Amino acid sequence: MGEPLAAWLVRGGKDGEREADALGQGLFIAGWPGLGDISGCSDRDELRLALRAAYPLSKKGSIDNWTGQLWRLLREIEVDDHVVMPLKRTRLIAIGRVSGEYRYRTECPPGFQHVRPVEWLHTDLPRDAVGPDLLPSLGSLLTIAGLRRFGAARRIAELAGSGVDPGSGVGDAVSGVPADAVSFLAAAVQSAPERPVRITVLQLLRLFGASRKSAGVSATIELALEENGLVSKPSIMQSDADDVVSLEPVVDDTSPVESEVADPVEERLIRLHVGRIRSATAGVVSVQLHDPLVKARTLMLTHNFSQLAVIEENGEFRGAVSWESIGQADMAERAAQVEDALMHARVVEHNEDLLNQIAEIYASGYVFVRGADRAISGIITAADLTQQFDGVVRPFVLLEEIEQRLHRTMGAVFAVEEIAAKASSRQRQQILDGQKPMLGLYQQVIKDEQMWRRLRWRLDHEAFLRLFNQVREMRNSLMHFSGGVLSDEELAPLHGLLRMLRVVDP
């Protein structure tokens, strides 16, 4: 027997219902009771189509997740690879060697038909036979997952032979996930079936050693979640830094998974969220309904505020008091408690579109902001908006001009059908129906040498593409970024591309 190519984690059902048959018949049994024979699927797209036909009500994220796992079963797992099956019913571990290709057993009941032959070498190893660094990798809730870290393939092969884990060695691939995050994910896996962990994206970022949300960090977190059989709802990619996400288990056989995998040229519209203004998440000074009004006056004078939030001890937001409402209460000779000067105050969600709130902020002078935890997280005054507006909005204005100029110049040279032909099937129809293409699609057009020549731009193609790609990454950063103002250095690609486009499109 040659050196094993890889090691794989496999499972015998949510409640271990396939374990006895797997061990007794020398098989790994994968489940997916609604799916027929997949041996004829030549690539992932064909497998994905088969899954969509079998599970028409399942979401795209489920289909993508299942496609990856079943493709491993069908093509990626090779003969002589080792598989590890944690046993639900005995709390022991079975280790075996794959001895044959994928088979579909028409004679067996649904859920027991997709198999790979396995020679089971150990069926009663205690869990502590696996080293403490590698053991958390066996906690994934997925039915089929690769074991790649900490020299897993070599160590599982040793366990298969001697029943002893030799531990990590020099040159073994180590986890790219910080130790604190590994411990957190292990605990989340244990908690997920009964009580999914809820955590803010910012807290997750810090666990992974990051302070700012970016596409790369988001992808790293979601990959780590996937490897542990967890999915973020909503997805990390589609959440802001202060949003709360739920880490829920992936249930393979029938349940939908909401994690979406974006098409490389399908991008979401960037929204300038209320939470991007610093004061929206800086907290508020507040009084309670039955506090003496003199307390409100004192706090307002101390902090030079024009208004105060009125929030009860249980966190209930009741409204606000302002110098105007206090003056009106004084004139009515009823100014004793805060409730005597109480006035309605508008509250907006932290993830609402800021541009839609500007008129209200300038009209009333302020709005209070509700954070992801449903508590009042801050206030935006007209002064806050004026002070920060240019720094926050400027990148969005630059991007808008870039997209407008691309739309105009591309539209003058290429027919809409030519541009749409570069898109995925779903986005293609949207473009033909009149939706404006985004940067990713224009990048596909510009990459085409023949289409580039038709533009007749006296610019170096390679340099332009390189800058264009930087702008796409900048756009992605803007979509994920939460809080603060981007530096001139960070905005340099936007300015550079815009200068080029202003030359070719005066």
Image (cartoon, rainbow, N blue to C red):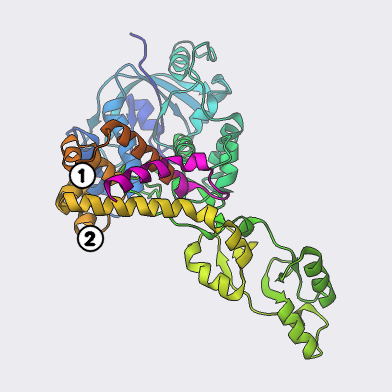
Spot occupied by residue 243 in the image (x, y as percentages of width and height): 54, 53
Is residue 30 visible from the viewing direction of this image? Answer: no
Q: Amino acid at mark 1?
A: Lys
Verify whether residue 488 appears in magenta. yes
- Front residue of this view, candidates 297 and 346: 297
Q: Amino acid at mark 2?
A: Gly
Q: Residues within 10 Å of mark 2 (few under 14, many from 20)?
A: few
Q: Main secondary structure of the magenta part?
A: helix
Residue to which mark 1 is pinned: 422
Verify whether residue 378 appears in magenta. no
Q: Quadrant of residue 76?
A: top left
Spot occupied by residue 263 in the image (x, y as percentages of width and height): 31, 44
Q: Tag 2, which secondary structure?
A: loop
Q: Quadrant of residue 383?
A: bottom right
- Front residue of this view, candidates 505 and 268: 505
Residue to which mark 2 is pinned: 434
| Residue 257 placement, left or right of 224 | left
- Front residue of this view, candidates 408 and 65: 408
Spot occupied by residue 506 in the image (x, y as percentages of width and height): 29, 51
Whole-Å distance between the Cαs marked 2 and 1? 15 Å
